[in-house]
Amino acid sequence: MHSSQSYRDKYWAIVTVFGTLWGGLELTLGTFLHTLHVPKTGLIMVSLSLILLIAQRRIFPARGLTLCTGIIAACIKSLSPGGIIVGPMFGIISEALVVELFLLPGSKNYISGIIAAGMGVLWSQLISVFRKWIIYGDDFIKALFKFISKFLTLESTSTVGWTLLASVLGAIFLIGGMAGFWGGRLGRRVENRIAIIGKEDIQPPAMTSSNRENNEEIIPENTENPEQTANQMIASISSPKHAQADEQIIKTRKYILPVAVITLMIQILAGFWVQNDLWWTIPALAVWMITLGIGAKNVLKSIWWPKFWLISILISLLCGIILAINFEGEWNYKLGIEATVRMLSRGVFVFSWINWFTRSIRSNEFLGIWQKLRMPNLGHALTKAYTLLPVWLDRMNELVKKRPRGFINNCKYIHECILICLVEAVRQTDEL
C-alpha cells in the first residue's frame, strides 16, 4: 500500500498536467480561432474544455479534480498577452465548479458526464448574459425581461415563444451533452490505450532531445518561485512592444487608482441616490477618459474597437426602443433616449475600466494570492504547471500547424489530436 501522501502527490500531479493542458489549449487554439474571427469561438472552446474535463474524470474519478484543474487553467490564462483576463478567468473557474458539482454522483457514469457537460454549456451562455448586465447595467436586464415576458404572454406568439425558448435551451444543452458523451468515450479509449502501451517506456510528452535544447531558455532553473516563472513565461509569449506598454500602465496606476475608484462608485451608486443619474455618470465618464488620456493612453486607444462599438450601439438602441414602447402603440421617447445614452456611456466606462484594471496588475501579484490563502499544494502545482507549459505550447502549436484541409478531415484530425494529448497527459502524470 502507498501512503496517503503518495495519493496526494498523484492527485496534484493530475491537477497540474491537465490544468496545464487546458490552459495551453486556451492560449493556442483559443487565440488562433479569435485571430481568424471564427464564429462561436467561445462555444467551441467551452465544448473542447468540457471534453477534456469529462475525459479526465473518467480516467481519474477523484472528487475535486475538476475544480482544481480549472484554477490552474485560469492562472495559466492570466499569462495571455495583455495581462490578466478577468472575464475568461472567471468563466473557466465557474465552468469547472459547475461541472464538478454535477459530477459528484459518479465520474465514470456516462449520464453524469452528459448532464455535467450540458449544464456547463448552459452556464457558459448564462455567463454571457451576466457579462452584458455588468457592462450595460439594469436597463439591459429590464429590456430583456420586458421583451421575453411580453413575447411569451401574447396569445399570438406565446406558443411560438415557448417553443423557441425550449428549442434554444435544448440545442445548447445537446451541444454540451454531446461533448460530455464524447469526453467519456475518449476517456475510455485513453484507458484502453494506456493499458496496451504499458508504463515501461513513459517519457514526458514532446521532450525529445531535438526540442529539449529549445526549451531550456524558457523553463526557469528555479521552479520553486512561481512569480519568477510567471514573469519568464510572460516574456516568452508577449511582444516587447505590448509588454512595454503594460509596464507604463503599471507605473501610473497609483495615480489613476483614486480616480478609478471614485468614478466607479459614482457609476454604481448614482442610480440609487439621484433621479437624473446621467448628470453624474456622464461627467464621471469624461473625467475617467481624461485621466486615461493623461496616464494610460494605450488603454484609451484599446477602446476604439469597431466590434465593441457596433455591438454596444446596437444593444443600446434596441433596449432603448423596447423600454420606450409599451406594446400598445404609445411611446415614451425620453425614457428610451435616456436608457440608450445610459447603456452606451456605461458600456464605454466598464469596458475601459476593466481593460485598465486587467493591464495594471502584474501576474505575479495575482499569483501571490495562493500564498495568502495558505494553499501550498496549489502553489506547488502552479509552479510546476509553468515549467510544463512551454512543452505543451510547442506540442499544440505543432499540431495546429499540421492541420489538414477540409471540414471533415479537420474534425477527424481534432478528434485524434485530443486523444493524443490525453494519452500524453496521463503518461506525463505518471512521470511527475
Image (cartoon, rainbow, N blue to C red):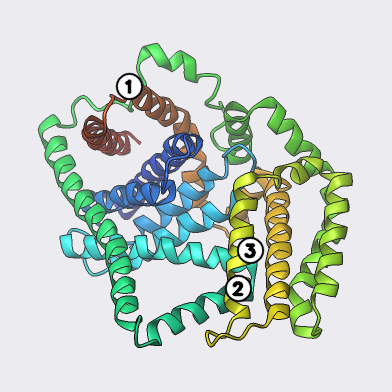
- Marks 3 and 2 sit apart, C-alpha to C-alpha, by 19 Å
The residue at which mark 1 appears reads as 402
Measuring 73% from the left and 74% from the top, which residue is drawn there?
338
Disc 2 secondary structure class:
helix
Name which residue lies at 29% across and 64% down. 173
Rendered view: 142 above or below 26? below
Q: Amino acid at mark 3?
A: Ile
CA neighbours of label 1 inside 10 A, class few (<14), some (14 to 19), many (20+)? few
> Residue 3 or 402: which is nearer the viewer?
402
Residue 261 marker: none
Q: Amino acid at mark 1?
A: Lys
Query: What SS does tag 1 mark?
Result: loop
Where residue 92 appears, as percent x and y from the top left, is 46, 54
Q: Residue furthest front?
A: 329
Task: Tell me, yes or no, if residue 60 can be seen here.
Answer: no
Q: Is residue 146 above or below residue 375?
A: below
Q: Which residue is mark 2?
A: 321
Residue under the point 36% across and 65% down: 122
Q: Is residue 157 above or below residue 14?
A: below
The residue under label 3 is 135
Q: Earlier in the sequence, mark 1 or mark 3?
A: 3
- Find the distance from the CA under tag 1 to the CA under tag 3: 39 Å
Q: Amino acid at mark 2?
A: Ile
